[in-house]
Amino acid sequence: MTVARFGRITPVQGDMLQLAGNVLSRQSDVDVTDEQRIAAIEAGQAALVARVGRDLGYELGPWHELLSSDHELRGEYQHSYGWRGVRAAIERALLDPRRENLLAALRSRCPPSS
C-alpha cells in the first residue's frame, strides 16, 4: 500500500503506524482529529492481534520488540519499502506525550476488564 509521508509500506508496517496514532491515507493527515487518531490506534492494535495471535495492548515498545525479533514477521516489518520512515515514526511516537494523552483518553472510555 502507498500512504502519504511514508510511501510504499507493508501491511504490518501500516498496522504499527496506526498503533502509533497515524491515520493512513493517500493525502496529508494535517487536519486529523484526536478521535481519528484514537480510532487508528484501535484499528492498528486489532490488526496486529489478528496477525500475530497475541495481544500486547496499545504500547508500542512491546509490539516493536516482538515484530523486530520474530523470525517470520521481522522481514515484513523491517522491509525496505518504508522501514526508514516507519522506524523514525515509531521512535518518535514512543516519546510523544500527545500519543500518551490519546491512550489515556482511550483507556478512560474502555477501562480494562477484570
Image (tube, rainbow, N blue to C red):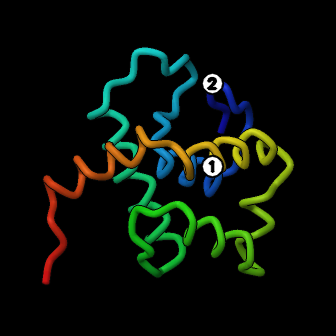
Residue that appears at 63% across and 75% down: 66
Quarter-wise, where is residue 44 in the image?
bottom left
Residues packed near mark 2 inside 10 Å, few (<14), some (14 to 19) or many (20 plus): few
Q: Secondary structure at mark 2?
A: loop
Instruction: Return the residue nearer the eye: 3 or 104.
Output: 104
Find residue 61 and report its horizontal and vertical position in percent: 57, 65
Q: Is residue 79 left or right of residue 12?
A: right
* Residue 96 sits above or below residue 7 on the image: below
Q: Is residue 62 left or right of residue 83?
A: left
Residue occupied by mark 1: 90
Looking at the rendered image, the quarter that the N terminus falls into is top right
Q: How many marks?
A: 2
Residue that appears at 46% across and 63% down: 59
Residue that appears at 55% across and 17% down: 27
Q: Is residue 106 left or right of residue 99?
A: left
Residue occupied by mark 2: 4
* Residue 110 sits above or below residue 113 on the image: above
Residue 99: numbered disc: none
Residues packed near mark 1 inside 10 Å, few (<14), some (14 to 19) or many (20 plus): many
Amino acid type, mark 1: Ile
Q: Is residue 18 left or right of residue 36?
A: right
Looking at the rendered image, the quarter that the C terminus falls into is bottom left
* Residue 113 sits above or below residue 111 on the image: below
Residue that appears at 77% across and 42% down: 82
Q: Earlier in the sequence, mark 1 or mark 2?
A: 2
Residue at the far bottom: name it: 114
Find residue 55 and report its horizontal and vertical position in percent: 41, 76
Q: CA distance from mark 1 to mark 2?
A: 16 Å
Instruction: Return the residue nearer the eye: 1 or 110.
Output: 110
Q: Secondary structure at mark 1?
A: helix
Instruction: Return the residue nearer the eye: 35 or 3.
Output: 35
Find residue 42 and report its horizontal and vertical position in percent: 34, 53
